[in-house]
Amino acid sequence: MFEEENIALPVDIFRQIRDFIRNYCGIYFDDKSKNTLERRLSRRLRLHYMRDFREYYRLLMYDENRDKELQAIIDILTVNETYFFREQMQFKALNEEIIPELKKKKDVKKINIWSAGCSTGEEPYTIAMLMLENKHFYNWDIDIIGSDISQRVLQVAREGVYKKNSFRTTDEYFIKNYFQDQQNGTQKISDKVKKMVSFNSLNLIDPFRVKLVGKVDVIFCRNVLIYFDMAARKKVIENFFDILNEGGYLLLGHTESLINISTAFKLVHLKNDLVYQKPIK
């Protein structure tokens, strides 16, 4: 069976759709991405029985169901590559350095951690398992929030059922103690982990939605900013700064930094990793 040909995407309409997506969620596609958008969005045109992208752009601009279509676009265009205990040194820094330091400063037994751009949930569930392993936080209120703009990945996260690929760097101990075998070879996260994590759909460039997260002590936002242009990156980091408690920490991906984005944070050299901290006034 032959694959259907792409519907031609004119340069002017490509730029209008690209700018529309950027204004909506911050994700930016440069001129080299035109063929990618043409290939992936051609399927949406066929689904709507449209003959050209100009008609599709009018749908995005004016149709009463445009929010639903935007969500479909996000699911098609975003890459959600993740797995448990990804970039293990950061989790080591969280468990051995950041959390003990926060515990010393806390007046109440409560810690809030936000996984921003959590994809299918492996990152916040990893954090939850580490907190359960840390006996020093018995009787503490640990609130872990996972957010993503894609409803599709959030559905997977809420179900908590994972295939073998999600465990590529996971020690057998955690699989044995925090997962249940399923008949089809998948593993289901245990209820004691699941109840520690809540998931929400959230657009990181929307300051009003971000404020609804509430004050947090730690933010994980790894390999998310790479999809944004500079203006959107600055907006996201400003939003993070606003909701972080003083002395709170921001952890980015290893290829990311705040150079040319923000000078509000302090770069902290821990034994296990480099992290950013909101200064204490």
Image (cartoon, rainbow, N blue to C red):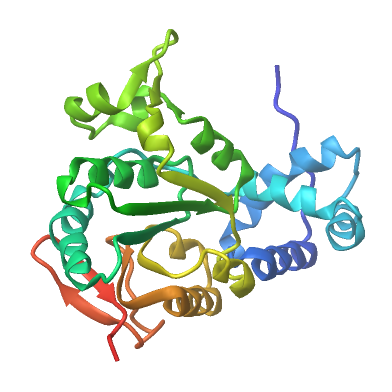
Residue 103 visible, this angle? yes
Tell me: 55 left or right of 82.
Answer: right
Which residue lies most toward the bottom here?
A: 281
Front-most of 241 and 77? Answer: 241
Which residue lies most toward the left here?
A: 271
Whole-percent x and y of residue 189? 39, 28
Front-most of 220 and 54? Answer: 220
Residue at point 78%, 48% (across, down): 68
In the figure, residue 279 lies in which quadrant? bottom left
Quadrant position of the N terminus in the picture: top right
Which residue lies most toward the top here?
A: 183
Front-most of 229 and 277? Answer: 277
Tell me: 217 left or right of 270.
Answer: right
Residue at point 36%, 87% (across, down): 264
Looking at the image, residue 88 lies above or below residue 112: above
Tell me: 133 left or right of 160.
Answer: left
Quadrant position of the C terminus in the picture: bottom left
Whole-percent x and y of residue 242? 47, 79
Tell me: 105 left or right of 237.
Answer: left
Whole-percent x and y of residue 24? 69, 66
Front-most of 24 and 248? Answer: 248
Residue at point 63%, 64% (across, down): 25
In the figure, residue 259 lies in which quadrant? bottom left
Residue 221 visible, this angle? no
Whole-percent x and y of residue 45? 83, 43
Q: How many labels does the image show?
A: 0
Residue at point 37%, 58% (across, down): 113
